Image (cartoon, helix red, strand yellow):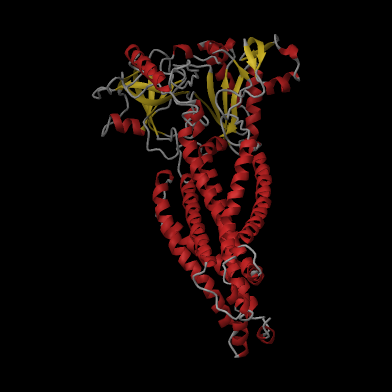
Amino acid sequence: MVMVSYGYWQRRYGGDPAAVGREIRLNGRPFTIVGVASRAFTGSLRGLSPAIYGPRMMVNQLNPSDVSDLEARGDQGVFPKARLKPGVSQGRAAIVLARLTRSLREQYPGPWQQDTKFVAVATADIIMNPMLDRVIVPAAILMMVVVGLVLLIACANLASFLLAQAADRRKEVAIRLAMGAERGRLIRQFLTEAAAMALVGGGAGILLASLILSGIEHADLPLPLPIALDLRPDATVLAFSLMLTVVAGLLFGLAPALQATKPEVAPTLKNEGAGGGRPNRCNLRNVLVVAQVAVSLLLLVGSALFLRSFRARLDIDPGFGARPAAVINAQASPALRAGDQGRGFFRTLRQELLALPGVEAVGLTGDLHLSPLNNSQADVRVPGFDPPPDRPGHLVYTTRVDAGFFDAVGVRIVAGRAFQESDRDGAPVVIVSEAFADRFWPGRSALAQVFLVDTVQQTVVGIAADAKVNSLGEDLTPFLYRSYEQRPGSGMEVVIRTAGTADGFVAKAVAIARRLDPELQIIEAKTMERHLSAMLLPHQLAAWIISAFGALALLLASIGLFGVVSYAVSTRSREVGIRMALGAEPQGVVRLLMGSGLQLVVVGTVIGLGLALVAGRALSGVLYGVQSMDPVAFVVAPVVLVLVAALAAWLPARRAIHISPVRSLKGD
């Protein structure tokens, strides 16, 4: 029996209540629908939304495999949820779980090592699941920091704009103060105007975020499982956005309000002349521009580091998959799961795929390298190497492959031979990676060496070139290949190497497999390129997102600098007119006006480089193939910033040479 999700019930049965009690076939077996989950229930793991739910005790019927999941004492990938009894604390539950861990460790010392234990975690503290949260939480914190920095730049930019606006209204404010207006009332007026501006910006931001998140929800990501995230802004998100909008309005509106309402009535009313004064070099607007430049450079250096790290990962040779290939992860139907029948099915499938025009090689593997859902391991005992404490042997990653695997995926056999179809149960043989051979037989040949794999004696017949196993950035990992002919299975990944692009062969391979076994379960069908790109996706997204925010920060800082120089041009119009009337060169006037802005850029750049040095050290753990003080990033980012800033300062400064000296000298 099974339950179906609300979404599946609507899609498959149109919401018909009579669906309850109907039969549904899963993996070739009949199951009865006994209920429909509520719309709000999307499973026990956030981010994944199963269509069908079954009892844990029926896992072998729902997902048949060669080993009973209910008897696999080494399977610690289950996240049970429990409701505590009234009065029982989480600490008390942890004590009970520790007692259970000790009991299991005594009964099953192999899979239950000293570092294997139950951990009680409050459901409210879990975002996705306890394993993924180790990666998701730091990444989310980093993104929040980046977003916060961009928000601060935007606030500084708007504060600078409001300061300029307040300067233009200083006479109006002085008159109102002279006539008895309360300063607090004027401050509230300025804050109200800033809040209105913030609300307009916040509303536009929520609308834009909704559009972007909608696109992300429907994005086709190269992941082994479909992601189901509800990214629609809810009441909590909207309330947080409103609060942040109000805080931002106060943040960028308070300083201009205080500056504009200073009780300096007499000097303001004297009206010393339009543009006659030289702007204060240390005013608040200059400080804000320096801050914008510094934070922008921090984000630019960060984006450069992430981009170079991503580029370094792209250059990693995974040790396989250099040629185009299609990959089909398939589980044979129950009728074909017996050893000889399953072996015969995959042999026939391999032969039919090889007959396709454009197919160069076909191979089988239980676990393809760099598959996040595959982590098969085995205990090996090599003469001369004592096993670790509390383990029967050294734990190494392993998979089973057939004779065509190495040619299909492009893993070279550097010594000995590949598997042969003649390899059968009588003489168990294995192929080891170079890292495996170097670890256990340093300085001598691993060929013909004999050792135990899960208590079965095996003989090394070949040595394969090293390939990445779990991640592109890992060190060389000892790996063990076991013969599919000696360990046949009903669930295998079929790799089809093609002469040209493999996109068209994915559908062809699935069609042939389903023709041979109509009840075949296709777990995943993809190209090798898509398979490899899944490992790069988190790093690619991080590089893109931080680069996008870095570019946005640069744009905002440039706008702020443009405003400062424009304001300098307007306030120094009389000075510019006098200089032009006395025969000053236009280029000299432009350099003079640009200089005031570029001085701020230089100060901000120095501060930004200091911040980037600190941030680089903090990010060193997530960078690959690039130093935290990478010279390219620390040179290119400031150069780009200075060039863009120079352009932002040049545009308004250039307008100054077109000011008529006669008109500028007339004053107000």
* In the rendered image, the vertical position of residue 261 relative to residue 393, given as above or below: below
Q: Is residue 276 left or right of residue 426?
A: right
- Residue 70, image x, y percentages: 47, 12
Classify the position of the C terminus by image quarter. Answer: bottom right
Q: Residue furthest front?
A: 180
Between residues 578 and 480, which one lies in front from this camera angle? Answer: 578
Residue 480 found in image quarter: top left
Residue sitting at 56 percent across and 47 percent down? 545
- Residue 288, image x, y percentages: 53, 62
* In the rendered image, the vertical position of residue 152 relative to residue 83, given as above or below: below
Residue 455 found in image quarter: top left
- Residue 263, image x, y percentages: 57, 68
* In the rendered image, the vertical position of residue 385 relative to residue 155, given as above or below: above
Classify the position of the N terminus by image quarter. Answer: top right
Q: Residue furthest left?
A: 384
Between residues 229 and 346, which one lies in front from this camera angle? Answer: 229
Residue sitting at 69 percent across and 84 percent down? 663
Q: Is residue 504 left or right of residue 548?
A: right
Q: Residue furthest bottom?
A: 582
Q: Is residue 436 left or right of residue 423?
A: left
Between residues 500 and 247, which one lies in front from this camera angle? Answer: 247
- Residue 613, image x, y percentages: 40, 55
Residue 5 found in image quarter: top right
Q: Is residue 251 visible?
A: yes
